[in-house]
Amino acid sequence: MLLDTSIKLRYIKGSRYVYGKTEKEVREKLKEIERNIDDGIYCEPSNMTVKLWLEIWLAEYNNDIKKSTLESYRTNINKHIIPSLGTIKLQKLRPDSVQKFYNSLHAGEEHQKALSARK
């Protein structure tokens, strides 16, 4: 039987916690966060899901879209994107998940007519 002898450390800076098994790992994670902040690419951890973001997008970011186009977007979002990706947190959404989703649409999985990209 193996015993887990690793330790977990945390460094608190403001309201941010950084966890690691060693002090070195914690310091490296903290340095990465600080670099990302300095570079303007740090994203505060969030519970926002793909579904919630798409609902916000449909409600708030549609000023220059024709009504018929918006309805088409709404239909496709509700019929395809939200059932497949809606529960994923935005921070956890990865290119491979989006590609797998796109491939399933293109192939017409689940007895649905395949969608094709406009050319």
Image (spheres, rainbow, N blue to C red):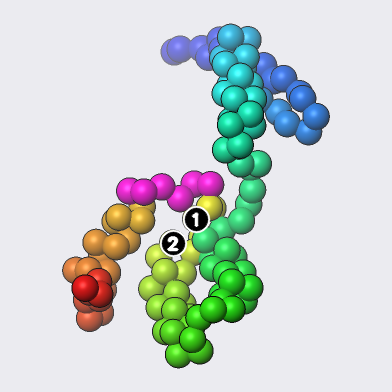
Left or right of 44 on screen, residue 92: left
- Label 1 close to label 2 by CB (< 8 Å): yes
Q: Secondary structure at mark 2?
A: helix
Measured as percent of width and height from the top left, residue 94 is found at: 41, 47
Q: Is residue 20 visible?
A: no
**Above or below 106: residue 20:** above
Residue 90, given in percent of the width and then of the height, sits at 53, 52
Please tell me whether residue 107 is drawn above or below residue 112 in the rendered image. Answer: above
Residue at left offset 36%, top offset 56%: 98
x%, y% of residue 14?
Answer: 80, 29
Task: Classify residue 83 as left or right of residue 22.
Answer: left
Predominant secondary structure, magenta span: helix
| Residue sticking out furthest to the front | 64
Picture quarter with the C terminus: bottom left
Mark 1–mark 2 Cα distance, whole angstroms, equals 6 Å
Q: Residues within 10 Å of mark 1 (few under 14, many from 20)?
A: some
Q: Which residue is mark 2?
A: 85
Asked if the stretch drawn in magenta spans residue 82, the answer is no
Residue 81, percent from left and from top: 42, 69
Q: Which mark is residue 88?
A: 1
Q: Residue furthest left?
A: 107
Position of the N terminus, as image quadrant, is top left
Which residue is at 36% across, 52% downward? Answer: 97
Magenta span = 91-96
Question: At 54% across and 78% down in the image, what residue appears?
Answer: 64
